[in-house]
Amino acid sequence: MKISTVPQSLRLMLISTAVATAFSLVAAIVVVASVRQPVLLTMRSAVTSTSSGFETGVISSGDATVARRPDIAYVYVGVESQQSSASGAQSDLANRAAKLIARAKALGIADKDINTSGYSVGPVYSSNSQTITGYRASEQLQLKWHNVDTVGKTLDGLVQDGGAMQVGVSFGLADPKAAQAEARNLAIADARARAKAMAGAAGVTLGQLIRVSDVTSSGSPSPMYGIRAADAGATQLPVGELNVTVTVEVAYAIA
């Protein structure tokens, strides 16, 4: 039996073709692998980190207000002078301010409770706003009066005997922290009650408290009363009560 053999030239050609085909196939695989987008498998953690900006749980807010009778009055008094020159206005104003401060001290206001809240000197113009007709100087003081029941009498003394030309008063608390603490406790209890109601409506149970924030905005100032020298008399100023309000925000995990 005779076995035919493949010529050497044909054998080399077949081998070269097979190798080239294999390399082409490998190159194609590499190209496909290089352009194919990676597949990422993700799994959400049972506890979501708050650093990602996403929170799970029950979030609610609460607020509470407590009323307190003021125990301090802030008295604002001012004097002014108008003269033909700036130096003259300042000099006359200094005399008026000295008289006012002396009267405040005579009423029992301590040096530490007398503060300058404003001082100004400027020209006064004619009606056409082109000619300077003089100069006006003014000074405002803030005084702390610790007996709110007699603040009306104090205002009368500052106007009638001290020469005050503008007077105003507001009331406050010398130490509001105790009232704020009470209101904060009530606000947190209110926030928890709301969160519990929300959880019940959603069919879940509140878990651990994970965050609480005080988001209280600036409270409204107490009413400002004002009188002028022409209104001087037996001034009566009702003191009433101040409301101290605190707002909080809480977040609970779901049990």
Image: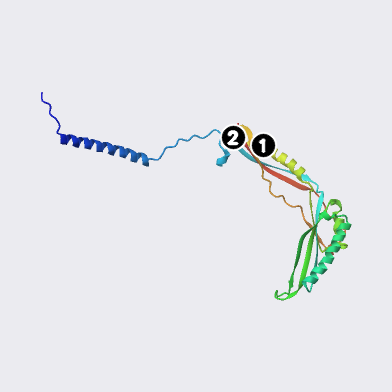
Front residue of 202/155: it is: 155
Q: Quadrant of residue 245?
A: top right
| In this rendering, the label closer to the viewer, 1 or 2 | 1
Q: Quadrant of residue 12?
A: top left
Task: Please report whichever mark, 1 or 2, sits nearer to the chain's N-terminal start.
Answer: 1
Residue at the (20%, 35%) spot, across then down: 14
- Report the side of 210 relative to 245 (left or right): left
Q: x, y percentage for residue 211?
A: 64, 38
Front residue of 114/177: it is: 114
For the view shown, which residue lies furthest in the top direction?
A: 1
- The residue to which callout 2 is attached is 202
Please say whether residue 82 is visible from this viewpoint: no
Q: Amino acid at mark 1?
A: Arg
Using a 10 Å C-alpha cutoff, classify the residue at mark 2 as few (fewer than 14 neighbours), some (14 to 19) or many (20 or more).
few
Question: In this rendering, is residue 205 above or below 249?
Answer: above
For the N terminus, which image quadrant?
A: top left
Q: Quadrant of residue 74?
A: bottom right
Using a 10 Å C-alpha cutoff, classify the residue at mark 1 as few (fewer than 14 neighbours), some (14 to 19) or many (20 or more).
many
Residue at the (70%, 40%) spot, across then down: 187
Q: x, y percentage for residue 37?
A: 40, 40
Question: In this rendering, is residue 140 above or below 177?
Answer: below
Residue 192: which disc?
1
Q: x, y percentage for residue 125?
A: 73, 73
Callout 1 secondary element: helix
Q: x, y percentage for residue 234?
A: 88, 58
Q: Amino acid at mark 2?
A: Ala
